[in-house]
Image (tube, helix red, strand yellow):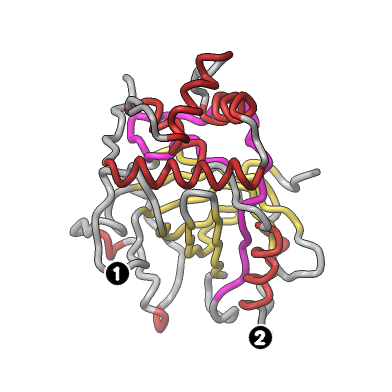
Amino acid sequence: MARELPRYSDEERERLRRALLEHVENKKFRYHRLAQDIADKANYGLEGDSGRRRVERFLKGTHRQNDDFIDAIARYLGSVPPPLIEESAATLADFFSRSVRQPHRVDSLIGRYRVYASTDRRAHGHEGFRETMSMNEWGEFSAPPVKPMLSRIPYAVIDMKPMQKHDALLVSETIFNFSVDPETDGFPAIPPRNNDAGVIVAFGYADREAPRYLMATRTMLEARLYRLYKVADDPLTLRGELSFNGGIGRPENMTHSDPLHPEYEVELVRIDDPIED
């Protein structure tokens, strides 16, 4: 079944155009190179001169492009990290680093993960959502036994790799289901793009029953904040919440006045370890 395309407002289109212009200026791309990069990363046909012209017209704002083109731009920008991402990751790691009574051993998380998202329960107020676990109930915080997510939508592939001189891991994030389409029922056969996009650090008291982590990633389009806790060792599985800052083209998301209100419940399941460069 074909994925239903989001409808993009004029404001969203202009925001995407400005973000793509910023990316072009950072990378010093020519139109032909940019069209090819979009075709590769978003799996969208922009070959030859016709592809170059479509990209040029969009950047110059001279033609109104159809929704499938705009959606490809959104998916492309959702996969492209901003400049200086490693420096930003190191700064965040330093900011959150602190002594804990029982070290989390964040290096034990190194590996490749499949990421599943769910629009049910935790993020959308389903009447049974508190049966999962509340991240705010620290006094009785425990992970196992943890109930399965009501739905598991394949969303992304994430690599966690050592980060030199920091008690943190560098994160590469490949999102292939950018709009969290529930009709997506599997992970692509192609290997993930090795784009460093953020960092994961131990977060919270380490003497609790379940180790907890904060993962932040950034692309040209949005910032993503994952609040995670470990629920299983074989395979290593993390469960938690995902919030966005600046997301676009996700019409199913619930609008909420709290910027940290989770859009999705997420589960990360490790499939390989360690990651070799």
When asked about the image quadrant of residue 35, the answer is top right
Q: Residue 269 at x, y = what percent?
A: 55, 47
Q: Residue 73 at x, y = what percent?
A: 46, 34
Amino acid identity at mark 2:
Arg
Do the numbered discs 1 and 2 sit on residues whose CB atoms are within 8 Å? Answer: no
Residue in the foreground of this view, choosing between 64 and 177: 64
Q: Residue 252 at x, y = what percent?
A: 26, 44
Of badges 1 and 2, nearer the viewer stands 1
Q: Main secondary structure of the magenta part?
A: loop
246 with respect to 166 (left or right)? left
Q: Residue 32 at x, y = what percent?
A: 61, 24
Residue at left offset 73%, top offset 70%: 167
User: Residue tagged by mark 1?
Assistant: 258
User: Residue tagged by mark 2?
Assistant: 101
- Quadrant housing the C terminus: top right
* Vertical comparison of 260 with 112: above or below: below
Q: Is residue 182 magenta?
A: yes
Question: Badge 2: how crowded within 10 Å, few (<14), some, or many (20+)?
Answer: few
Residue interval drawn in magenta: 174-203
